[in-house]
Image (cartoon, helix red, strand yellow):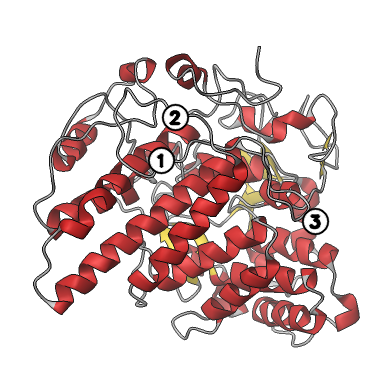
Amino acid sequence: MQFIMKKISLYITAFLMILLAGCSEDWLEVDPSTSLRTDKAFNNLDDAQVALNGAYSSMQSAGYYNADIITYGDMKGTDVRSWNNGKRADNQYLYQEEPEASNSSLWSQPYYGLMLVNTILDQIDDMPAETAEEEAERDHIKGQSLALRALLHWDLVRIYGKMPENGTPSSDLGVPIIDKVIDPENKPARNTVKEVYDFVISNLQTAIPLLKDEKNDGLFNSFAARALLSRVYLYYNNPGQALTLAEQVIGNNQYSLIDAAGYVGSFVSGSNSETVFELVNTTDDNSDREGVGYLWDPEGYGALTLTDQMIGIMQENPDDARSGLLAPDSRDAGRLGYLLKYPGKTTSTRVFNVPIIRLSEMYLIAAEAAIKTSAMTTAQGYLNDLLEARTGVADSLAVADVDMDVLMYERRKELIGEGHRFFDLVRNGMPIDRQGDDHLNNAPMYIDPQGSGENDFRVVQPLPRFELDVNPNLIQNQGYEG
């Protein structure tokens, strides 16, 4: 379902009805995406829940979590490429984002979601709660809204701002922090990367004690918020905090690693013991042919394929369950370039859940954070736990085997197709080094995110031109000013 903002002053349920009916993008040339005027108050927690459902649903846009933010992290990396010229997401793969034709929904969709959660947070404390149960529900709605506000800001800053570098928070420009309901006359400037990260962390720290612990598919609970905060701390060069939070999630008995026999099938249904936070699509509520499942499907759009190098990596150990995610591509004599992480919950690849945070990532975060704090035995333990689940072989890594190269190698195999590879390289200051002769024409083969070459600025996305036109306080990212 594609949700697009309109220039109107309205009550949230009317907001959703208009969006469901289909909307025009014409208003985007008038008001900045950071703005929304709301004049009416919620009457009760049911109204707030409707708005919260809308905030979650805003993530289902193919321009956000149902496709573009996932393909952004994969196609700009080393392991997934466009099937052919002219396919969807080519601009990501070829590093050809431009202000006039960039993935503007990666800016507008998060800001649309922020308008919804800020509307909730603006009023939630004043909503009546007559019983302890209602108070707990009010807290849970508030906690989810804070967690979503953190996630939406974090997605924006990791796409439109530079990564924090070398343990020193970046003073480079990030994105505008929107922490309240503002109207179209308000034209905020960009906050720094440090300010945005601090805001994200503060929101998650406030959210965690408000959230319920119980797992509820598709929604934030306290452990999903801890998992997100662990990831944010890892990006923010605070491995000690990242390790502590990851261990809290790993130690909770609601989650467990899936064994090798069940691993491939776990992506069919979604909502399994490794699911910490996911986006749930249904037969009635999905992105149809624009979703990432259809983009992978050779019988669908078939826009994405694994690189030859990645196919080889996943085939190195035939006992590794992850090799079972390789499927033949009917267009190329059985080439195993089709990744079965979005096979469809029904007979159609249009209906799938998007895994945003899985338990296996917590093991990888814990291992990486341990390496970065020189706790090598701890890192070895978490990597071996994950490898045993995927291969059935216990204690395959000795302490001497464990380093960042091994860690990054396991992240490649475990998180392929989930939108991590590009960000993993950039946040660690590692080059995007594309190898093999199967990459398409003009795809940059080597980009150093820490360098000063002419292509290096392209590890950061340009701000959409229409946003600059309507908000003179925004400054374009370096390299896209023309």
Name the residue at 31% across, 48% down: 117
Asked whether disc 2 touches disc 1, contact meaning CB atoms under 8 Å apart, the reply is yes
Q: Which residue carries the number 3 mark?
A: 312
Residue type at mark 2 is Pro
Indicate which disc residue 178 carries: 1
Residue type at mark 3 is Gly
Cα separation between marks 2 and 3 = 48 Å
Label 3 vs 1, first from the N-terminus: 1
Q: Where the C terminus falls, by quadrant?
A: top right
Label 2: how many Cα within 10 Å (few below 14, some 14–19, many 20+): some
Q: Is residue 64 left or right of residue 377?
A: left
Residue farthest along the top direction in this orientation: 482
Indicate which disc residue 154 carries: none
Cα separation between marks 2 and 1 = 8 Å
SS for tag 3? helix
Residue 265 position, x and y percent, is 51, 69
Of residues 105 and 193, the one nearer the viewer is 193
Residue type at mark 1 is Ile
SS for tag 1? loop
SS for tag 2? loop
Q: Where the N terminus falls, by quadrant?
A: top left
482 lies above or below 97: above
